[in-house]
Amino acid sequence: MEKKKVLVTGGLGYIGSHTVVALAESGFEPVIIDNLSNSDPSVTDRLQDILGYRPFVYLEELRDRKTLLEIFKEHNFHGVIHFAASKYVGESVSNPLKYYKNNVDGICSLISVMLEYDVKSIVFSSSCSVYGNSEEQPVTEDMFRYYPPESPYGHTKQIGESMLEEFSRAYGLKCFSLRYFNPAGAHPSGSLGELPDRKESNLFPLMCRAAVDPEYQLTVFGKDYETPDGSCIRDFIHVCDLAEAHVRALDVLEGSKESYYQILNIGTGKGTSVLECIQEFSRSNDIEVNFKIGERRKGDVVKVWASTDKAERTLGWKTKRGLDEICKSAFTWYKEVKKL
Ligand SMILES: NC(=O)c1ccc[n+]([C@@H]2O[C@H](COP(=O)([O-])OP(=O)(O)OC[C@H]3O[C@@H](n4cnc5c(N)ncnc54)[C@H](O)[C@@H]3O)[C@@H](O)[C@H]2O)c1
């Protein structure tokens, strides 16, 4: 039987590449479009090593409508997972135009071509950054409806959610907006993960660096927040658990005959402080992390973790991997990619 093809925009990126693997493992055929603006061509080779075959990869710009039309003509897509976006909060403050152009135009271009080819199912990468600073924890999907965004990046995710909700109603699309919490960790093979040395790194690549580079010290931004140990609290989710949620989401959309729109939190439901995270990283990898306490960083949310009830109910999915697995896999990948 022919495999169902799924277009993965941004499929050479961190979360996209892990989702490509999860899709292939579940019997789908992923087709990637990525303009390499925040990824490396070597990811295709790495995917080939894991999958045992070379996936279809178009090194193209998502907003180029002509290219997109050709790709849709070439493949009969069952659905789309839309990761391609610019994602750096700080950069979005200094260059908001880049963010509105890429993240909002990207959705318009994609949806218009999907409609032309009658492809109805789409899973959209949203973010817990849409919750801003909420007093109540864990956050539930309906707790917020458009707080002032913390950054232009967060605003583009709010806009994306609204657009997709309206498009679902108007054009009969079937859509999930998945609000990711803090993806971390890497594929168990050690050959796929979050590329280090990006513009604004997440905590894990920086912790890895602080563990091996004597010249580098990790800064923990603030130890005077109203949390048990004074550092910020996040909900760290293993990237492979996150990837699997996308596959479930596509299955659920397939089962729906009518237009459909749902927002789901994709996290573990457990808050971990930055200091606890450093401690667990040291413990599970048996290595010291060189860090110092710095000033609070502007724009950081104090604490956020997910209520996962709705995702568990809707997708029949929950996370399987713990923080120790996140820490170990992140470090194994870091050493592999840095050839240490
Ligand atoms: N990583 C996180 O912490 C996090 C948290 C919440 C939400 N998200 C969202 O999840 C999605 C994926 O995140 P990620 O961490 O894998 O990011 P990433 O930067 O690693 O991956 C995004 C990929 O999209 C590609 N891309 C960007 N714009 C494109 C365009 N116009 N045309 C074609 N390709 C394009 C990039 O080259 C990159 O490979 C993003 O939408 C991001 O905003 C990420």
Image: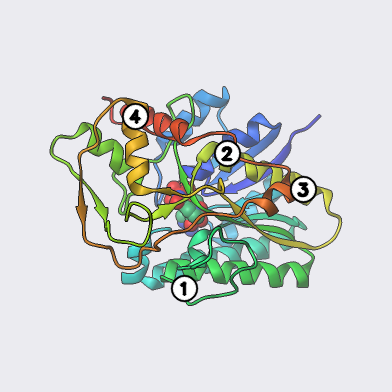
- Which residue does the numbered mark 1 point to in the structure image? 149
Q: Give the colour scheme shown.
A: rainbow
**For marks 4 and 3 on the same chain, the one whose residue lies earlier in the sequence:** 3
Q: Amino acid at mark 4?
A: Arg
**For marks 4 and 2 on the same chain, the one whose residue lies earlier in the sequence:** 2
For label 1, the SS is: loop
Tag shown at residue 241:
2
For label 3, the SS is: helix
Q: Are marks 4 and 2 in contact (CB under 8 Å)?
A: no
Whole-number angstrom distance, CA of label 4 to CA of label 3: 39 Å
The answer to whether the residue bearing label 1 lies less than 8 angstroms from the nearest atom of ligand 1 is no
- Which residue does the numbered mark 4 point to in the structure image? 283
Left or right: residue 95 compared with residue 142: left
The image quarter containing residue 120 is bottom right
Q: Are marks 3 and 1 in contact (CB under 8 Å)?
A: no
- Which residue does the numbered mark 3 point to in the structure image? 252
Q: Residue at x 44, y 66 (%)?
A: 153
The answer to whether the residue bearing label 3 lies less than 8 angstroms from the nearest atom of ligand 1 is no
Whole-number angstrom distance, CA of label 4 to CA of label 1: 36 Å
Q: Could you tell me residue 202's position as x and y percent?
A: 36, 49
**For marks 2 and 1 on the same chain, the one whose residue lies earlier in the sequence:** 1
| Of marks 3 and 1, the one in the foreground | 1
Whole-number angstrom distance, CA of label 4 to CA of label 2: 22 Å
